[in-house]
Protein backbone atom coordinates (compact mmCIF):
# COMPACT_ATOMS: atom_id res chain seq x y z
CA UNK A 1 0.00 0.00 0.00
CA UNK A 2 1.40 3.41 -0.97
CA UNK A 3 0.27 6.88 -2.02
CA UNK A 4 -0.75 7.29 -5.60
CA UNK A 5 -1.95 10.88 -5.35
CA UNK A 6 -1.66 13.28 -2.45
CA UNK A 7 -2.50 16.94 -2.36
CA UNK A 8 -3.37 19.38 0.41
CA UNK A 9 -4.35 22.90 -0.53
CA UNK A 10 -5.16 25.60 2.02
CA UNK A 11 -6.47 29.00 0.94
CA UNK A 12 -4.99 28.43 -2.53
CA UNK A 13 -1.51 27.42 -1.32
CA UNK A 14 -0.35 23.87 -1.97
CA UNK A 15 1.41 22.21 0.98
CA UNK A 16 4.03 19.52 0.77
CA UNK A 17 3.89 16.12 2.40
CA UNK A 18 6.77 15.43 4.86
CA UNK A 19 7.64 19.14 4.81
CA UNK A 20 4.35 20.51 6.05
CA UNK A 21 2.20 17.52 6.91
CA UNK A 22 2.19 13.77 7.40
CA UNK A 23 -0.48 11.37 6.11
CA UNK A 24 0.02 7.62 6.44
CA UNK A 25 -1.68 5.30 3.90
CA UNK A 26 -2.86 2.86 6.59
CA UNK A 27 -4.64 5.65 8.48
CA UNK A 28 -6.49 7.08 5.49
CA UNK A 29 -9.01 6.02 2.90
CA UNK A 30 -9.32 7.54 -0.58
CA UNK A 31 -10.84 10.97 -0.26
CA UNK A 32 -11.43 14.09 -2.35
CA UNK A 33 -12.91 16.96 -0.37
CA UNK A 34 -13.32 20.68 -0.53
CA UNK A 35 -14.56 22.66 2.47
CA UNK A 36 -14.86 26.32 3.45
CA UNK A 37 -14.97 25.70 7.15
CA UNK A 38 -12.90 23.83 9.73
CA UNK A 39 -13.96 23.16 13.31
CA UNK A 40 -11.45 23.81 16.06
CA UNK A 41 -12.25 20.97 18.44
CA UNK A 42 -9.83 21.59 21.33
CA UNK A 43 -8.12 18.36 22.24
CA UNK A 44 -10.64 16.06 20.56
CA UNK A 45 -11.65 14.65 23.94
CA UNK A 46 -15.05 13.35 24.98
CA UNK A 47 -14.95 12.42 28.63
CA UNK A 48 -17.43 12.43 31.50
CA UNK A 49 -16.30 15.79 32.91
CA UNK A 50 -14.96 17.38 29.79
CA UNK A 51 -16.07 17.16 26.13
CA UNK A 52 -14.72 19.12 23.17
CA UNK A 53 -17.71 17.85 21.19
CA UNK A 54 -20.25 19.66 23.36
CA UNK A 55 -22.27 22.38 21.59
CA UNK A 56 -20.57 21.97 18.25
CA UNK A 57 -21.63 20.25 15.03
CA UNK A 58 -18.85 18.18 13.49
CA UNK A 59 -20.80 15.76 11.33
CA UNK A 60 -19.02 15.37 7.95
CA UNK A 61 -16.67 18.17 8.99
CA UNK A 62 -12.92 18.61 9.06
CA UNK A 63 -11.78 19.16 12.63
CA UNK A 64 -8.55 20.56 14.01
CA UNK A 65 -7.28 19.34 17.37
CA UNK A 66 -4.32 19.53 19.71
CA UNK A 67 -2.45 16.54 21.07
CA UNK A 68 -2.71 15.66 24.75
CA UNK A 69 -5.23 17.02 27.24
CA UNK A 70 -5.89 20.31 29.05
CA UNK A 71 -3.73 20.90 32.11
CA UNK A 72 -3.81 23.60 34.78
CA UNK A 73 -0.82 25.89 35.36
CA UNK A 74 0.44 23.54 38.09
CA UNK A 75 0.53 20.72 35.53
CA UNK A 76 -2.45 18.75 36.82
CA UNK A 77 -4.83 17.38 34.22
CA UNK A 78 -8.46 18.50 34.04
CA UNK A 79 -9.34 14.95 33.06
CA UNK A 80 -7.60 12.97 35.81
CA UNK A 81 -7.33 15.81 38.37
CA UNK A 82 -3.80 14.65 39.06
CA UNK A 83 -0.27 14.88 37.67
CA UNK A 84 -0.99 11.76 35.64
CA UNK A 85 -2.12 11.95 32.04
CA UNK A 86 -5.27 10.14 30.99
CA UNK A 87 -5.35 7.71 28.08
CA UNK A 88 -6.65 10.57 25.95
CA UNK A 89 -3.00 11.67 25.88
CA UNK A 90 -1.36 8.27 25.61
CA UNK A 91 -3.73 6.44 23.28
CA UNK A 92 -4.51 8.43 20.14
CA UNK A 93 -6.96 5.72 19.06
CA UNK A 94 -9.42 7.05 21.67
CA UNK A 95 -9.56 10.43 19.92
CA UNK A 96 -10.05 8.75 16.55
CA UNK A 97 -12.94 6.70 17.96
CA UNK A 98 -14.57 9.78 19.50
CA UNK A 99 -14.33 11.64 16.17
CA UNK A 100 -15.68 8.60 14.35
CA UNK A 101 -18.71 8.38 16.64
CA UNK A 102 -19.57 12.01 15.76
CA UNK A 103 -19.24 11.39 12.01
CA UNK A 104 -16.13 13.53 11.55
CA UNK A 105 -14.74 13.35 8.01
CA UNK A 106 -11.15 14.25 8.71
CA UNK A 107 -8.98 14.95 11.76
CA UNK A 108 -6.18 17.47 11.44
CA UNK A 109 -3.72 17.34 14.31
CA UNK A 110 -1.54 20.29 15.30
CA UNK A 111 1.80 18.58 15.71
CA UNK A 112 4.24 20.47 17.98
CA UNK A 113 6.89 17.79 17.53
CA UNK A 114 6.53 17.65 13.77
CA UNK A 115 10.16 16.72 13.04
CA UNK A 116 10.06 13.70 15.37
CA UNK A 117 6.81 12.56 13.78
CA UNK A 118 8.32 12.83 10.29
CA UNK A 119 11.27 10.69 11.42
CA UNK A 120 8.95 8.09 12.91
CA UNK A 121 6.58 7.88 9.94
CA UNK A 122 8.92 8.58 7.03
CA UNK A 123 9.34 4.98 5.89
CA UNK A 124 5.58 4.37 5.91
CA UNK A 125 5.21 7.40 3.66
CA UNK A 126 7.91 6.87 1.05
CA UNK A 127 8.03 3.11 0.65
CA UNK A 128 5.03 0.81 0.35
CA UNK A 129 3.54 -0.59 3.55
CA UNK A 130 2.92 -4.34 3.59
CA UNK A 131 0.07 -5.76 5.61
CA UNK A 132 -1.48 -9.18 5.88
CA UNK A 133 -4.85 -9.10 4.16
CA UNK A 134 -6.31 -10.71 7.28
CA UNK A 135 -5.65 -7.41 9.05
CA UNK A 136 -8.04 -4.58 8.49
CA UNK A 137 -6.23 -2.67 5.78
CA UNK A 138 -8.04 0.60 6.46
CA UNK A 139 -11.25 1.07 8.38
CA UNK A 140 -13.46 2.88 5.87
CA UNK A 141 -15.73 4.26 8.56
CA UNK A 142 -12.86 5.96 10.34
CA UNK A 143 -12.05 9.64 9.70
CA UNK A 144 -8.91 10.37 7.70
CA UNK A 145 -6.00 11.72 9.73
CA UNK A 146 -3.35 14.30 8.83
CA UNK A 147 -0.68 15.70 11.13
CA UNK A 148 0.25 19.31 10.44
CA UNK A 149 3.38 21.30 11.26
CA UNK A 150 2.79 24.37 13.43
CA UNK A 151 3.40 26.72 10.52
CA UNK A 152 0.94 24.90 8.29
CA UNK A 153 -1.56 24.90 11.16
CA UNK A 154 -1.17 28.69 11.54
CA UNK A 155 -1.76 29.14 7.82
CA UNK A 156 -4.87 26.98 7.98
CA UNK A 157 -6.27 28.83 10.97
CA UNK A 158 -5.50 32.20 9.35
CA UNK A 159 -7.32 35.16 10.90
CA UNK A 160 -8.69 32.97 13.69
CA UNK A 161 -5.22 32.18 15.06
CA UNK A 162 -5.57 34.56 18.01
CA UNK A 163 -8.92 33.07 18.89
CA UNK A 164 -7.58 29.51 18.78
CA UNK A 165 -4.65 30.41 21.05
CA UNK A 166 -6.92 32.40 23.33
CA UNK A 167 -9.40 29.52 23.54
CA UNK A 168 -6.66 27.02 24.25
CA UNK A 169 -5.39 29.12 27.15
CA UNK A 170 -8.90 29.54 28.46
CA UNK A 171 -9.58 25.80 28.25
CA UNK A 172 -6.45 25.23 30.33
CA UNK A 173 -7.49 27.85 32.86
CA UNK A 174 -11.13 26.85 33.30
CA UNK A 175 -11.25 23.24 32.19
CA UNK A 176 -14.19 24.07 29.92
CA UNK A 177 -14.25 23.24 26.19
CA UNK A 178 -14.34 26.10 23.68
CA UNK A 179 -14.77 24.54 20.27
CA UNK A 180 -15.82 26.72 17.32
CA UNK A 181 -15.93 26.71 13.53
CA UNK A 182 -13.75 29.06 11.49
CA UNK A 183 -13.49 29.90 7.80
CA UNK A 184 -10.72 28.25 5.83
CA UNK A 185 -10.67 26.96 2.25
CA UNK A 186 -9.29 23.46 2.36
CA UNK A 187 -8.94 21.04 -0.57
CA UNK A 188 -7.60 17.58 0.13
CA UNK A 189 -7.11 14.70 -2.29
CA UNK A 190 -5.75 11.36 -1.15
CA UNK A 191 -5.65 8.34 -3.44
CA UNK A 192 -3.95 5.12 -2.46
CA UNK A 193 -2.33 2.45 -4.53
CA UNK A 194 -3.11 -0.99 -3.13
CA UNK A 195 -1.68 -4.13 -4.67
CA UNK A 196 -2.03 -7.77 -3.58
CA UNK A 197 1.16 -9.80 -3.24
CA UNK A 198 1.12 -13.55 -2.62
CA UNK A 199 3.39 -15.05 -0.01
CA UNK A 200 3.76 -18.62 1.20
CA UNK A 201 5.09 -20.21 4.35
CA UNK A 202 6.65 -23.62 3.81
CA UNK A 203 6.23 -26.42 6.34
CA UNK A 204 7.69 -29.86 6.94
CA UNK A 205 6.04 -31.91 9.67
CA UNK A 206 7.66 -34.78 11.53
CA UNK A 207 5.24 -36.71 13.65
CA UNK A 208 6.42 -37.78 17.07
CA UNK A 209 5.60 -40.94 19.01
CA UNK A 210 4.56 -40.92 22.71
CA UNK A 211 3.89 -37.19 22.85
CA UNK A 212 3.08 -36.47 19.25
CA UNK A 213 0.52 -33.80 20.17
CA UNK A 214 3.33 -31.65 21.46
CA UNK A 215 5.18 -29.72 18.79
CA UNK A 216 8.49 -27.93 18.57
CA UNK A 217 8.73 -25.38 15.76
CA UNK A 218 12.08 -24.71 14.11
CA UNK A 219 11.82 -21.60 11.98
CA UNK A 220 13.71 -19.25 9.70
CA UNK A 221 12.55 -16.59 7.29
CA UNK A 222 13.42 -17.24 3.65
CA UNK A 223 12.54 -13.83 2.21
CA UNK A 224 14.99 -10.95 1.85
CA UNK A 225 14.82 -7.37 0.58
CA UNK A 226 14.66 -8.16 -3.14
CA UNK A 227 16.06 -5.80 -5.76
CA UNK A 228 16.76 -2.11 -5.90
CA UNK A 229 17.08 -0.89 -9.49
CA UNK A 230 19.50 -3.37 -11.07
CA UNK A 231 20.96 -4.56 -7.77
CA UNK A 232 20.04 -7.99 -6.43
CA UNK A 233 20.20 -8.48 -2.69
CA UNK A 234 21.00 -12.17 -2.29
CA UNK A 235 20.93 -12.17 1.50
CA UNK A 236 23.27 -15.14 1.92
CA UNK A 237 23.56 -14.60 5.65
CA UNK A 238 20.17 -12.91 6.05
CA UNK A 239 18.68 -15.40 5.78
CA UNK A 240 20.08 -17.96 3.36
CA UNK A 241 22.04 -19.27 6.35
CA UNK A 242 18.99 -19.85 8.54
CA UNK A 243 16.94 -21.26 5.66
CA UNK A 244 19.72 -23.73 4.86
CA UNK A 245 20.05 -24.69 8.51
CA UNK A 246 16.33 -25.49 8.79
CA UNK A 247 16.46 -27.56 5.59
CA UNK A 248 19.48 -29.47 6.89
CA UNK A 249 17.77 -30.12 10.22
CA UNK A 250 14.72 -31.39 8.32
CA UNK A 251 16.97 -33.61 6.22
CA UNK A 252 18.60 -35.07 9.33
CA UNK A 253 15.20 -35.71 10.92
CA UNK A 254 14.06 -37.46 7.75
CA UNK A 255 17.19 -39.64 7.67
CA UNK A 256 16.69 -40.54 11.32
CA UNK A 257 13.08 -41.48 10.59
CA UNK A 258 14.15 -43.74 7.73
CA UNK A 259 16.52 -45.49 10.13
CA UNK A 260 13.62 -46.02 12.52
CA UNK A 261 14.75 -43.40 15.03
CA UNK A 262 11.72 -41.41 16.08
CA UNK A 263 11.30 -38.51 18.44
CA UNK A 264 8.80 -38.44 21.27
CA UNK A 265 7.45 -35.09 20.22
CA UNK A 266 6.54 -33.74 16.82
CA UNK A 267 8.68 -31.19 15.00
CA UNK A 268 7.49 -28.61 12.52
CA UNK A 269 10.18 -27.10 10.32
CA UNK A 270 8.74 -23.80 9.24
CA UNK A 271 10.18 -21.45 6.61
CA UNK A 272 8.33 -18.16 6.79
CA UNK A 273 8.10 -15.25 4.37
CA UNK A 274 7.61 -11.50 4.77
CA UNK A 275 9.95 -11.15 7.76
CA UNK A 276 11.63 -8.12 6.24
CA UNK A 277 8.22 -6.46 5.82
CA UNK A 278 7.32 -6.76 9.48
CA UNK A 279 7.46 -10.43 10.55
CA UNK A 280 4.41 -11.12 8.37
CA UNK A 281 4.78 -14.86 7.71
CA UNK A 282 5.26 -15.79 11.37
CA UNK A 283 2.47 -13.40 12.33
CA UNK A 284 0.20 -15.22 9.88
CA UNK A 285 1.24 -18.61 11.27
CA UNK A 286 0.58 -17.81 14.94
CA UNK A 287 -2.84 -16.42 14.05
CA UNK A 288 -3.67 -19.28 11.65
CA UNK A 289 -1.75 -22.17 13.23
CA UNK A 290 -1.83 -25.60 11.57
CA UNK A 291 -1.05 -27.29 14.87
CA UNK A 292 -2.47 -26.43 18.27
CA UNK A 293 -0.60 -23.44 19.70
CA UNK A 294 -1.42 -24.60 23.23
CA UNK A 295 0.56 -27.75 22.49
CA UNK A 296 3.37 -25.89 20.76
CA UNK A 297 6.09 -26.28 23.37
CA UNK A 298 8.72 -24.02 21.88
CA UNK A 299 10.17 -22.19 18.92
CA UNK A 300 13.78 -22.19 17.81
CA UNK A 301 14.28 -19.39 15.31
CA UNK A 302 17.38 -18.94 13.18
CA UNK A 303 18.10 -15.63 11.52
CA UNK A 304 21.71 -15.10 10.31
CA UNK A 305 24.13 -17.79 11.49
CA UNK A 306 26.65 -17.97 8.62
CA UNK A 307 28.99 -15.13 9.49
CA UNK A 308 31.26 -13.72 12.19
CA UNK A 309 30.86 -10.26 13.71
CA UNK A 310 33.61 -7.83 14.73
CA UNK A 311 33.71 -9.07 18.33
CA UNK A 312 34.63 -12.66 17.39
CA UNK A 313 37.11 -12.20 14.54
CA UNK A 314 39.68 -14.40 16.31
CA UNK A 315 37.43 -17.07 17.81
CA UNK A 316 34.44 -17.73 15.61
CA UNK A 317 32.92 -20.59 17.65
CA UNK A 318 30.15 -18.50 19.13
CA UNK A 319 26.44 -17.88 18.86
CA UNK A 320 24.30 -15.11 20.25
CA UNK A 321 21.37 -16.48 22.21
CA UNK A 322 18.33 -14.25 22.60
CA UNK A 323 15.11 -14.89 24.48
CA UNK A 324 15.76 -18.39 25.85
CA UNK A 325 15.16 -17.44 29.50
CA UNK A 326 12.34 -14.94 29.00
CA UNK A 327 9.38 -17.31 29.21
CA UNK A 328 10.91 -20.55 30.42
CA UNK A 329 14.00 -21.38 32.44
CA UNK A 330 13.89 -24.92 31.04
CA UNK A 331 14.53 -23.90 27.45
CA UNK A 332 17.55 -21.94 28.59
CA UNK A 333 18.90 -24.94 30.50
CA UNK A 334 18.33 -27.38 27.66
CA UNK A 335 20.22 -25.09 25.32
CA UNK A 336 23.11 -24.76 27.79
CA UNK A 337 23.39 -28.47 28.52
CA UNK A 338 23.17 -29.51 24.85
CA UNK A 339 25.90 -27.03 24.12
CA UNK A 340 28.09 -28.41 26.89
CA UNK A 341 27.57 -31.97 25.74
CA UNK A 342 27.84 -31.58 21.95
CA UNK A 343 28.39 -28.20 20.35
CA UNK A 344 30.78 -26.35 22.69
CA UNK A 345 30.03 -22.95 21.22
CA UNK A 346 30.53 -19.75 23.18
CA UNK A 347 26.94 -18.81 23.99
CA UNK A 348 26.83 -15.04 24.14
CA UNK A 349 23.88 -13.39 25.92
CA UNK A 350 24.84 -9.76 25.19
CA UNK A 351 21.76 -9.12 23.06
CA UNK A 352 19.47 -10.91 25.48
CA UNK A 353 19.74 -8.05 27.99
CA UNK A 354 16.31 -6.49 28.54
CA UNK A 355 17.77 -3.00 28.05
CA UNK A 356 19.81 -3.83 24.95
CA UNK A 357 19.36 -0.84 22.61
CA UNK A 358 19.26 -3.04 19.48
CA UNK A 359 16.07 -4.73 20.71
CA UNK A 360 16.77 -7.86 18.64
CA UNK A 361 14.38 -9.80 20.86
CA UNK A 362 11.54 -7.94 19.17
CA UNK A 363 12.96 -8.03 15.67
CA UNK A 364 12.75 -11.55 14.30
CA UNK A 365 10.07 -14.20 13.88
CA UNK A 366 10.43 -15.90 17.29
CA UNK A 367 8.85 -12.78 18.80
CA UNK A 368 5.45 -13.65 17.32
CA UNK A 369 5.66 -17.00 19.12
CA UNK A 370 6.86 -15.39 22.35
CA UNK A 371 3.90 -13.02 22.18
CA UNK A 372 1.66 -16.09 22.25
CA UNK A 373 3.51 -17.19 25.40
CA UNK A 374 5.45 -19.92 23.58
CA UNK A 375 9.03 -20.14 24.87
CA UNK A 376 11.30 -19.09 22.04
CA UNK A 377 14.99 -18.96 21.37
CA UNK A 378 16.63 -16.87 18.68
CA UNK A 379 20.07 -17.80 17.31
CA UNK A 380 22.00 -15.04 15.62
CA UNK A 381 25.59 -14.20 14.59
CA UNK A 382 25.36 -10.44 15.13
CA UNK A 383 25.56 -7.85 12.39
CA UNK A 384 28.38 -7.05 9.98
CA UNK A 385 29.24 -4.57 7.24
CA UNK A 386 27.28 -6.55 4.60
CA UNK A 387 24.02 -6.54 6.54
CA UNK A 388 21.19 -5.53 4.16
CA UNK A 389 23.74 -4.67 1.44
CA UNK A 390 24.25 -6.20 -2.01
CA UNK A 391 27.49 -7.69 -0.67
CA UNK A 392 25.72 -10.20 1.61
CA UNK A 393 26.84 -13.05 -0.69
CA UNK A 394 27.63 -16.73 -0.32
CA UNK A 395 31.41 -16.23 -0.80
CA UNK A 396 31.47 -14.58 2.60
CA UNK A 397 29.67 -17.37 4.42
CA UNK A 398 31.79 -19.48 6.77
CA UNK A 399 30.34 -22.86 5.76
CA UNK A 400 31.97 -25.06 8.46
CA UNK A 401 30.80 -22.60 11.09
CA UNK A 402 27.29 -22.53 9.63
CA UNK A 403 27.25 -26.37 9.78
CA UNK A 404 28.41 -26.33 13.40
CA UNK A 405 25.68 -23.90 14.42
CA UNK A 406 23.01 -25.78 12.43
CA UNK A 407 24.04 -28.96 14.24
CA UNK A 408 23.59 -27.18 17.53
CA UNK A 409 19.99 -26.39 16.51
CA UNK A 410 19.49 -30.08 15.66
CA UNK A 411 20.90 -31.21 19.03
ZN1 LIG B 1 16.74 -11.63 8.84
Image (spheres, helix red, strand yellow):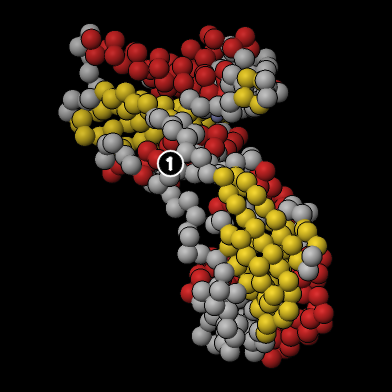
Other-residue count near label 1 (Cα within 10 Å), few / some / many at <14 / 14–19 / ≥20:
many
Viewport quadrant of the N terminus: top right
Q: Which residue is mark 1?
A: 283
Q: Secondary structure at mark 1?
A: helix
Q: Quadrant of residue 383?
A: top right
Q: Nearer the viewer, residue 108 or 117?
A: 108
x, y (%) of residue 159? 82, 79
Left or right: residue 238 versus residue 35 is: left
x, y (%) of residue 376? 42, 37
At 52% from the left and 14% from the top, the residue drawn is 402
Q: Is residue 139 above or below residue 192?
A: below
At 55% from the left and 27% from the top, the residue drawn is 224
- Seen from this angle, which residue lies furthest left? 210
At 72% from the left and 81% from the top, the residue drawn is 182
Q: Quadrant of residue 313?
A: top right
Q: Nearer the viewer, residue 177 or 296?
A: 177
**How many numbered circles are shown?**
1
x, y (%) of residue 20? 77, 58
Q: Is residue 117 visible?
A: no
Q: Is mark 1 within 8 Å of ligand 1?
A: no
Q: Is residue 96 visible?
A: yes
Q: Nearer the viewer, residue 247 or 410?
A: 247
Left or right: residue 310 versus residue 238 is: right
Q: Quadrant of residue 32?
A: bottom right
Q: Nearer the viewer, residue 232 or 250?
A: 232
At 58% from the left and 89% from the top, the residue drawn is 55
x, y (%) of residue 220? 45, 27
Q: Quadrant of ligand 1?
A: top right
Viewport quadrant of the C terminus: top left
Amino acid sequence: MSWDKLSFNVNNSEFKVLWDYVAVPTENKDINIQVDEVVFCGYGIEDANYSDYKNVNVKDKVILIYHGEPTRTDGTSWITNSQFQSDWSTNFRKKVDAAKSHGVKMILVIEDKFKDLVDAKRSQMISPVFLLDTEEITDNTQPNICYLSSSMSSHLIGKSLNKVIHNRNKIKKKGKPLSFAFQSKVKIEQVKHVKAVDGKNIMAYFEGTEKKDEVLIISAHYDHIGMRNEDVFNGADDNGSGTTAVIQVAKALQMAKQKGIKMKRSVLCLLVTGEEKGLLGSNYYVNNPRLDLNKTIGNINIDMIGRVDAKYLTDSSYLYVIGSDRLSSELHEINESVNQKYSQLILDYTYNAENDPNRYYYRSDHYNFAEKRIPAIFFFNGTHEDYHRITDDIEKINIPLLAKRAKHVFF
